[in-house]
Structure formats: C-alpha cells, structure tokens
Image (spheres, helix red, strand yellow):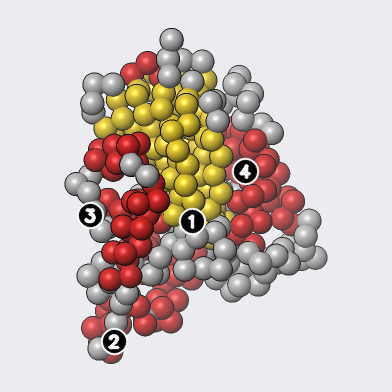
Amino acid sequence: MFEVNKTFSHKGIGKVNEDVYFANHRYAWVFDGATGLTNRHITNTESDALWYTNMLSSVLNERIDNMSRLLSDILSECITVTWEKFLSLIEINELSAIDIPSAVGCVVRCNANIFEYAILGDCSLIVEFKDDNVICICDCRLNALDGKSLATGLEASRRLGIPLSKCKEHMLPTLIENRLKMNTPQGYYNFSNSQDAAQHSIQGSIPMETISRICICSDGFSQYYELFKLCKDCKEFIQLVASQPIECLYLKLTDAQKQDSEFENFPRLKLTDDATVVCLDVVTN
C-alpha cells in the first residue's frame, strides 16, 4: 500500500491552476489540463481545462477501485464518460482539436502486491527501488512536438532579433499543427476525445515489494531537474522531494524561471507552468 509522503500543486502564469491530483493508500494520479488554443470557454467556466481535469478525476475516482479490471480499460471508460459529459454542454458536436480542452497525466495503483501505472503525455513517474536504483518513466511523444514548436520560435528569435519569450505568435501555426495531431499515430495521445488513447498509454507493472517510493509530477515541476538542472538527476530530485519542504523546491524553481524571463538560457513555451508533485512511500508487509 501507499503512504502519502507529500502533495503539492501551484498555478503557473495562468489565472487558474489546471492541474488536478489525487492520492490515497491505494492509488494516485496527476492530470495536467490544456485549454483549447482558441480559448472558447465552452464550459462557461473560467477554464475549460480545469473543468475537464476535475471531471476526469471525479469519474476515475468512481471506477479505479475495481481491481479486476485493467487500468487501461478503466481509463478508456473514463475518457468516454468525461467526453460525453463535455459534449452535453454544447449544442454542436463538431469541434476542432484546437477548440477542445484536454489533459495529459499519470495514474498509478496498488493492486494487491503489484504496482500498476499508465501515462499519457508529459507527466513523469519516478520510481525509487529498495536497491537504491531510480528510474523515470514518461511518454516522450508530446515532448518531440513541443521541441518542434520551440525550434520554430528560436528560428523567429534569431531572424527578428527578439527574445524567444516574444515569439509566441510565430510559434502558433506549429502549435496548431501539433494540436491537430492529438490522438493520432502521427502525433501524441492524451485524455481527451478518443477512448482508444488509453490503449496507447505507457503502461507497466512492478512488484510492490521492490519499490520504496514513487513520485508523480507534471511537466511544470519536472523542469526542476530536466530543464533547469537544479539537481543532478531524477534520483536526487525524488530524494529532495521526500526529505525537504516542497515549497522550498518550488521557490527555487520559480526563482530560476524568473531569472530567465526571456527564455534565452532555458528555451520553453511559457515563463512558468502549473506545477504538481505527488510523493508516495511504499509500505509492504
């Protein structure tokens, strides 16, 4: 079973935090929401993405306790139900992928003596084993597309002589192109408008007895060790998360982000992003 070590979530540069998390002794997840690029506010709320991640989390909470079902099958049903609830709010069924909210995420479950996980998108799962080895499991398909958007922005920055932070409009065509590849073999998969997406998730299972601790983080927090290199690697990161006040790590990250306010040293799509961490200790008999 799990013992919750700590949880943390904070909004980035946006008006609201579109990350949603849950954790208890049997399962945990982090969902990182993304609003449609046209900002249509289809749900008549402040954030379509927050509506979507909250609904997805609620639907999953009602189903994940069925340990006889595969995690991927449960997630497929959750996508279907959440999408249907979303469609019930609008009068038209034809929406472009750039209009709709979506979510990436990582879901983990303790199923008897087996640790199960499923990941879609750029949330990261760090697993610390009792033999002191540490692995990071993630879905890199979205990262590759984000890299293409950044390359477009960097080219515009060089050509126009302006900071990358001012190149969002020049990246928009590539961002749209990438979003239109959502839930396609040519692009990436997420928790959105395709129930089949869960079958394309990064899935696996590990004997619980071999694990000492796990950490789930949205990409807004994994920047700590991936982009800004504020610690050596994911192994040091999970140890810091488990042993230090998470607020201190977050402040160190945001300080680094603000010091690179023009994105010159650490290319990225926004100044700060919603940042979430869930850290769980594994307790076995």
The foreground one among 195 and 204 is 204
The residue at which mark 1 appears reads as 10
Quadrant assignment, res 159:
bottom left
Could you say where residue 128 lies in the image, as x and y percent from the top left? 31, 30
Separation of residues labelled 4 and 2 (CA atoms): 41 Å
Residue at point 40% right, 69% down? Answer: 270
Whether residue 105 can be seen here = no
Residue 87: assigned label: none
Question: Where residue 16 sits in the image (x, y, percent)?
Answer: 57, 63
**Distance from the alpha carbon under mark 1 to that under mark 4:** 17 Å
Q: Quadrant of residue 230?
A: bottom left
Q: Which residue is mark 4?
A: 57
Taking depth in this image into account, of 205 and 195 the one nearest to the observer is: 205
The numbered mark, 4 or 2, whose residue comes first in the sequence reads 4
Q: Residue at x 43, y 10 (%)?
A: 285
Say which label, 1 or 4, has the lower sequence index: 1
Callout in the foreground (2, 1): 1
> Which callout, 2 or 3, points at the residue further toward the start of the chain?
2
Mark 2 or mark 1, which has the lower sequence index?
1
- Of the numbered discs 4 and 3, the one sitting upstream in the chain is 4
Residue corresponding to mark 2: 162
Say what amino acid the circle numbered 4 marks.
Answer: Ser
- Tell which of 24 and 161 is nearer to you: 24
Nearer to us: label 4 or label 3:
3
In this rendering, the answer to whether 44 lies above or below 26 is below
Asked if the residues shown at circle 3 and circle 1 are in contact, with their CB atoms under 8 angstroms apart, the answer is: no
For mark 3, does the 10 Å Cα neighbourhood hold few (<14), some (14 to 19), or many (20 or more) residues?
A: some
- Amino acid type at circle 3 is Lys
Label 1 element class: strand
What separation in Å lies between label 2 and label 1 (alpha carbons)?
30 Å
The residue under label 3 is 229
